[in-house]
Each structure stands twice: as C-alpha cells, then as structure tokens.
C-alpha cells in the first residue's frame, strides 16, 4: 500500500507520537465536536464524547494498523462514544437533565432565524435519521463517508437523510400552522 498522509498519520498514532495526536486533533476535533453535539444534544456530552474518541485512539493504537479509512473510523468511534454517553445520561437523575443543551450548533440552537420547534423536531427524529443529519450537516461528511462510519451503504445514508428532511419539513409546517 503506498504511503499517504493518512497512512503517515496512522503510523504516528500507532507509535504513540504526540505530534501525530496533535495533528489529528487539529484536523478533526472541530468536526467531531459538531457531529457529537448533533448526536448528543449537549455541548458537555459532545466534549466528553470527543475526548473519549481520542482517549480510545491512544489506548487502541496498536490495532490502528488495520484501519483502512481514518475518517470512517473516527466517526464510527464517535458514534459509539455518543451512544455510551446517551446511556449514561438516561441513568442520571431527572433533576440533572434540565442542564442539557437542546440541540446541535447549526441545527436550531436558538440563533436568529431558527424556526421555533426545530430543536424539538430534531429530537423527535428516529436515532438513525438524527445521526445521519448530524454527520451530514454538522460534520460535513459525504453520504459515502457517513455510510462507512455507520456501516451502511451510501444510498441508505442518503435515504435516511431525505426521510429526516421530510419529517423536519412536515414538523415545521405543523409549527407554522399552529
């Protein structure tokens, strides 16, 4: 396999080079955080999920030689970290849940021009649609990359995205009518 910047980066990660982890963080942390916020609905949980990804990368560095697609690997790891955070969140007492931020940046966080009810409509999407929306909108992934990260084909990712947009449009139309 020819050496590529991604292969060089993976080699540095496997060796535990601090510079490789710093480079990885510089390249991916912002996109991972935006996607995590979309998946978790909480800035704090998003930060924790991203930290879990980087911590997990270091712990599993010896197995990174089997990684074919670093982008897919990172977002699959993020998806798993966000899911673990969601389970922990459900286990928290109800009074702690009031502090959770409602939605992802870029997806209706109360800024100018956000439609009322968009945050709620996003929360009501089925999880498989919500995660595709977060990876597409917040992380800027292609449907091919989303498919690789989620273990589905690109057409399935595109369909889930389309269905999510249809649900969001219908929800927003219902909000306008109210």
Image: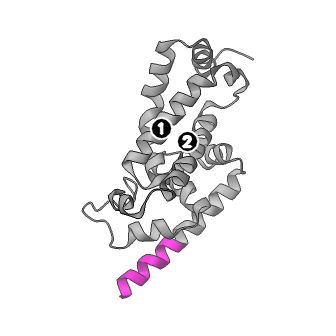
Residue 83 horizontal/vertical position (percent): 57, 50
Which disc, if any, is residue 78?
2
Residue 150 appears at what percent x and percent y?
66, 48
Find out whether residue 53 is within the magenta segment. Answer: no
Q: Is residue 50 left or right of residue 113?
A: right
Which of the two discs, 2 and 1, labels the residue nearer the N terminus? 1
Question: Where the N terminus falls, by quadrant?
Answer: top right
User: Which label sits on residue 164?
Assistant: none
Asked if labels 1 and 2 touch by Cβ distance under 8 angstroms, the answer is yes
**For the point 72% across and 51% down, which residue is it?**
153
Residue drawn where x is 46% and y is 34% of the image? 51
Q: Quadrant of residue 98?
A: bottom left
Q: Position of residue 63 (x, y in %)?
A: 70, 23
Q: Position of residue 175 (x, y in %)?
A: 38, 81
Q: Which element is circle 2 on?
A: helix
Residue where numbered disc 1 is placed:
50
82 w.r.t. 52: above or below: below
123 vs 176, nearest the viewer: 123
The image quadrant where one finds the C terminus is bottom left
**Could you classify mark 2 by the number of other residues whose Cα lies within 10 Å: few (under 14), some (14-19), or many (20 or more)?**
many
């Amino acid at each position: 396999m020819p050496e590529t910047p991604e292969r060089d980066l993976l080699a540095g990660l496997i060796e535990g080079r601090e510079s490789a982890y710093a480079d990885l963080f510089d390249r991916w942390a912002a996109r991972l955080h935006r996607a995590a916020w979309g998946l978790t609905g909480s800035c704090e949980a998003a930060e924790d999920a991203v930290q879990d990804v980087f911590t997990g990368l270091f712990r599993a560095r010896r197995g990174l030689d089997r990684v074919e697609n670093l982008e897919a690997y990172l977002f699959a790891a993020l998806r798993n970290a966000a899911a673990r955070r969601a389970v922990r969140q459900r286990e928290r007492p109800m009074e702690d849940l009031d502090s959770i931020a409602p939605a992802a940046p870029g997806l209706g966080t109360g800024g100018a021009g956000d439609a009322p009810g968009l945050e709620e409509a996003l929360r009501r999407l089925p999880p498989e649609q919500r995660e595709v929306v977060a990876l597409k909108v917040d992380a800027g992934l292609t449907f091919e990359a989303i498919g690789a990260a989620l273990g589905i084909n690109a057409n399935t990712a595109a369909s889930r995205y389309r269905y999510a947009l249809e649900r969001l449009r219908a929800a927003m139309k219902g909000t306008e009518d109210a």
